[in-house]
Image (cartoon, grey):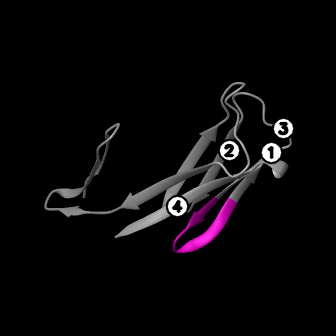
Amino acid sequence: MTEGFPATYDLANLKWTLDGTSSDPVSDEKQSAPQGTQWTLTVTNKITVVITQGEFPDLFADGDEFKFSVFKSAASGGKTNEMDEGYIDVTDGP
């Protein structure tokens, strides 16, 4: 099973919104967003994303987007998920 989660930035409201392909969108809005500000977006039992504001001039712009994919694969010893490009290995035993 694979599910996509795009996160999109709304500059006017200093808000990140995470949309799941099978869940309602979740948002985190701030009053200000200086360097180091963190937005936490959680879709219960599926994904938690923490996005951190960089430093000037690399601040988030309206419409900036991150795309996340979550997948499950079964193995005889439990669940093992592996991704390349930067390499992330998530292992959850039985």
- Please name the residue shown 50% across and 56% down the image: 47
Tell me which amino acid carries mark 3. Ser
Q: Which residue is mark 3?
A: 32
Q: Is residue 57 left or right of residue 43?
A: right
Q: Which residue is mark 1?
A: 30
The residue that disc 2 covers is 39
Number of numbered callouts drawn: 4
Q: CA distance from mark 3 to mark 4?
A: 25 Å
Q: In the image, which residues are magenta?
A: 18-26
Name the mark on residue 5. Answer: 4
Amino acid type assigned to the residue bearing label 4 in the image:
Phe
Residue drawn at 60 percent across, 64 percent down = 19
- x, y percentage for residue 85? 33, 40
Tell me residue 16's x, y (percent): 69, 52
Instruction: Give the Cα separation between the discs numbered 3 and 1.
Output: 5 Å
Cα–Cα span, label 1 and label 4 = 21 Å
Question: Magenta stretch containing residue 67, yes or no?
Answer: no
Q: 42 and 8: which one is in front?
A: 8
